[in-house]
Amino acid sequence: MRLRSCLAGLALVLLEAFPGGAAQAAEECPAKSNAMEDIIAVLNGAPSCDRAMKLFEACAYGASGDVQFGEAVEKKCEADFVGQAKPPQKLSYQRELAACDRKYRNKSGTMYISATAFCRAEVAQRYSRRALKAGGAGR
């Protein structure tokens, strides 16, 4: 009974850390290998923020290496909004990123480092989508 409770708890943690679960992992990572450099190259080559996020989901390690992948996605997404964002928007964005950094701060294990990277990338993706919607661009 105790094992069943532990497994159920672990499943909840993983669902929280990786929203969408198996549905997001449906796409295979198109990188030529699992090497970090190859995955980062694929992320940097993505045509849009949304595509970079999909690739991040497909290529993620589920560990601390995801920090570099998340940073590549953040950078791709920020290109859509940082230049035209006003100071209050930039401050709001920084606060949301900081909230991601705090969310799993006291948790141990590399999967929480990955969850933080995903949280930050999702924030950047949200801001990108808002900016593109407001600008009428269809990227």
Image (tube, grey):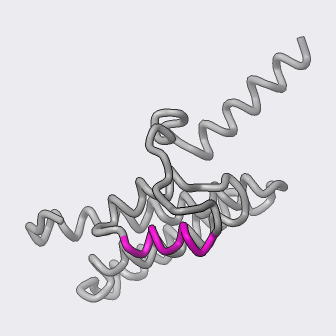
> Is 64 left, or right, of 42 in this rendering?
right
Q: Is residue 84 above or below residue 53?
A: below
Question: Does the segment drawn in magenta span residue 39?
Answer: yes
Quarter of the image for the N terminus: give it.
top right
> Which quadrant would residue 66 be assigned to in this image?
bottom right
Q: Is residue 17 above or below residue 89?
A: above
Q: Which residues are magenta?
A: 36-45
> Is 45 left, or right, of 8 in this rendering?
left
Q: Position of residue 37 (x, y in %)?
A: 59, 75
Q: Label the magenta part by its dominant secondary structure.
A: helix
> Which quadrant would residue 82 be assigned to in this image?
bottom left
Question: Does the segment drawn in magenta span residue 111?
Answer: no
Choose between 41 and 123: the one closer to the eye.
41
Name the residue furthest left. Answer: 136
Name the residue furthest front. Answer: 32
The reply to whether residue 70 is in sight is no
The residue at the point 28 percent across, 69 percent down is 47
Q: Is residue 88 above or below residue 2?
A: below
> Is 62 left, or right, of 72 in this rendering?
right
The reply to whether residue 7 is in sight is yes
> Which quadrant would residue 60 be assigned to in this image?
bottom right
